[in-house]
Amino acid sequence: MTPALPAESWLERVPLTVRDLVTGLFPAPWRWLAGSVLAILAVVLGFGLLFTLLTLVERKALGRMQNRPGPNRTGPFGLLQPIADGIKLLVKEDIVPFAADRPLHFLAPVVLVAFTLLTFAVIPYGRHLLPVDLDAAVLFFFAAGAATELAVFMAGWSSHNKYSLLAAMRALAQLISYELPLLLAVVPEVMRAGSLSTAAIVAAQGRWTLGILPHWSVATPGGAAAFLIFMTAALAESNRSPFDLPEAESELIAGHLTEYSGFKYALFFLAEYLGMTALCAMAVTLFLGGWQAPCVFLQFVPSYVWFFLKLAALLALLIWIRGTLPRLRLDQLMRLSWKFLVPLALINLGTVAFWQLSAGWEPLPARAARWAVALLLVLGPFVALGQRLGAGVGPRRYRYAPA
Amino acid sequence: MTAVLVIVAVCTLAAAAVAFALRPLVHSALCLVLAWAGVAAFYLWAGAEFLAFAQVLVYVGAISMVVLFAVLLTRRQSGEGDSRVAGAARRVAAGLAVAALVAGVLGRAVLAVPPASAPVAPPTLGVRQLGGELADGHAAALLAAGALLTVALIGAVVLAAGDAGRHGEDPP
């Protein structure tokens, strides 16, 4: 049952108060514009800052996992390292190859960052913190994300370098392959909430059993499966390890980024981290209850604190995965998407449909049966497909390498 | 509001015009993508939010990739655009014929609607109503399209799964 909302604390209303204070400085006809500019500034500055922090945390954490200290020379505990990196990249020479297609070479990083930033517009960061409340917000998110594929192509083609072009086509193949499971994993949440609006999807998860068990969609069998599929595909979409083949620093030159240097390279880096953050924020919104508190009695903590705690947890998980798993080969990558994730996501649609239709099964045995059937529908295909995934594919033998 | 429409229309038409005037095929393809984005902007102007985002997702995200891959995989090594010189007249005629056909169909569809006698308020259609409309009146068509696409998707997966044995091994 939905408990009566406690009176909102002043902390919960701080963003609204700040907005009213700032927009109050402007004449009334311009207030909406001031409010929008304020929201844009908050998103760009906030996530820009998060990006610098994330690079440092990632390097530190990876260092610890690999038994080395990580950056520790610039400032106390290496805290000023991101600033030093930023200055270095800003003052580096910007080299454009002679044969490069100059306008496209320049436009690629700009398009990439612009469209990645657009995706942040529809994420509800808190109860009162939703920059743009669209009716089709989820669709907007993925439409803006899809345009980044174009930027990857532009970067690879305009460099006029065969390695860049080949790597860009590989990157595109990966992005397109994993777009499908990503979108299919979102459909269950849309079915559950009956809406494409992110605010409605979060609101649909705002209930608790006994006040301590949240009704987040990840707590249902179908939702958990969709969450895992979504996160796997999100790793691949943001070129993160173990799917970082497009620009595998240690074995390819740098993929489609080969001919980029200085600040343009930094922009690609920025877009990669922003894209990863945006996908994690979407995962929090769709599966982890968005800004909802995990327990009723914890609702005194402001909603945006919960959102950013969950976001930080997911980002830490991604860094942990990068420190743990080795990189996949291209054929393994494709096989995982087309033969495993896509069929699982399709079957999961049926599972969630069953879960929604059986929502009225109230008596205890019926509820147990509901859980059993749903778990079977999730785990059965997972095991069956997982066993078939590696069937017939022996260890790879290399012609010119020692056995 | 009309000024926005004029800007969007001019940008879209200019992008389309540049697309078939340009020599490098990849530039033409990218201009075509810009034209598709312009169409999405027009949908947004007309208040069809869902359609606009779907247009971006499908055309700018997916179809553009098909076009670009096609251009890259069929490109001739010796200079781009050479092949356009031969048989230019026939190509122009074919293009004009297709354009006339599309214009005819669109014109017929537009003329079939009686002109409104009084200015009508633009309908505000949410995603929910759109879905209701699709599932209510056009359920059969929607199901057929969905079944077709699912079969195509499963078929692609089955085709890909067929040659599993050949993967991952070099002949010794």
Image (tube, rainbow, N blue to C red):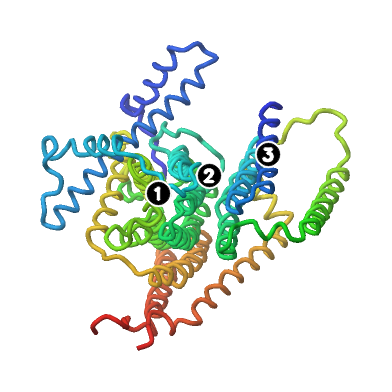
Q: Which residue is mark 3?
A: B14
Instruction: Estimate the spatial distance between the alpha carbons at disc 2 and disc 3, rounded to whole Å.
Output: 25 Å
In this view, A213 is above or below A180: above
Name the residue type under label 2: Phe
Residue A286 seen from this side:
yes
> Where residue A17 sits in the image (x, y, percent)?
38, 20
> Where residue A293 sits in the image (x, y, percent)?
33, 42
Q: Is residue B96 left or right of residue A384?
A: right
Label whose residue precedes the other's in the sequence (2 or 1): 2
Q: Residue at x 39, y 16 (%)?
A: A21
Name the residue type under label 1: Leu
Q: Which residue is mark 1?
A: A279
Foreground: disc 2 or disc 3? 3
Q: Which residue is mark 2?
A: A140
Most foreground residue, A372 or A134: A134
Chain identifier of the residue bearing label 1 in the image: A
Q: Residues within 10 Å of mark 2 (few under 14, many from 20)?
A: many
Most foreground residue, A4 or A302: A302
Instruction: Estimate the spatial distance between the alpha carbons at disc 2 and disc 1, rounded to whole Å.
Output: 13 Å
